[in-house]
Image (cartoon, rainbow, N blue to C red):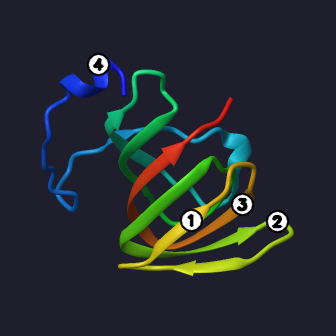
Amino acid sequence: MSVAEQLIPSFVRNVPDAELTPDPLDPAQIISGTPEVSGLVLWESADGARTHGIWQITPGVVTDTEADELFVVLSGRATVAIEGGATLEVGPGDACVLREGDRTTWTVHETLRKVYSITTHD
């Protein structure tokens, strides 16, 4: 653990009421609808390899290439289809693990808010 990581104090954040910042999608990721993404980084390691935060997406269909991620859905519902793999139905209270390199298609049925922890590898 780096010195910078040790200096970050412990904290609590109310997730349902947290104000998120818009994070526009690349138009090439949007398959249908007009989904909007917003988020809030709660913590990031000094080297940028680990990030914890809150993420939200409104209804629509989008594609993504994933990092190693654990997330818990707070509200909303989506179907996450992994190319060549499983189709996951996620909703409130569900914990989900995605693997780095997974190519996914997210069909968001109801605005989805999740808390996530991502690890990237170089």
Marks 2 & 3, CB-CB < 8 Å contact: yes
Which amino acid type corresponds to the residue marked 3 in the rendered image?
Answer: Thr
> What residue appears at the point 72 percent right and 71 percent down from the top-left corner?
81
Residue 64 place in picture, x, y as percent: 68, 51
Q: Earlier in the sequence, mark 4 or mark 1?
A: 4
Q: Which residue is mark 1?
A: 97
- Foreground mark, 1 or 2? 1
Report, in whole angstroms, how far the alpha carbon at label 4 lies from the one at label 1. Answer: 28 Å
Quadrant of the image containing the N terminus: top left
- Read off the residue under disc 3: 104
Q: In this rendered view, identify the residue nearer to me: 27 or 82.
A: 82
Tell me which amino acid carries mark 4: Ala
Counting from the top left corner in percent of width and height, residue 14 is at 15, 56
First reached walking from the N terminus: tag 2 or tag 3: 2
Q: Which mark is residue 4?
A: 4
Q: Are there few (<14), some (14-19), or many (20+) residues within 10 Å of tag 4?
A: few
Q: Earlier in the sequence, mark 4 or mark 2?
A: 4
Near-viewer residue (50 or 92): 50
| Position above or below: 66 against 49 | below
CA gap, disc 3 and disc 4: 34 Å
Instruction: Give the mark nearest the N terminus, 1 or 3.
Output: 1
The residue drawn where x is 22% and y is 58% is: 15
Is disc 2 surrounded by few (<14), some (14 to 19) or many (20+) residues within 10 Å?
Answer: few
Q: Secondary structure at mark 3?
A: strand
Q: CA distance from mark 1 to mark 2?
A: 15 Å
Question: Cα distance, mark 4 to mark 2?
Answer: 38 Å
Residue identified by numbered label 2: 83
Image check: 3 left or right of 10? Answer: right
Question: Farthest residue in the front direction?
Answer: 1
Find the residue positioned furthest to the right: 84
**What kind of residue is marked 1?**
Val
Q: Cβ–Cβ below 8 Å for labels 1 and 3?
A: no
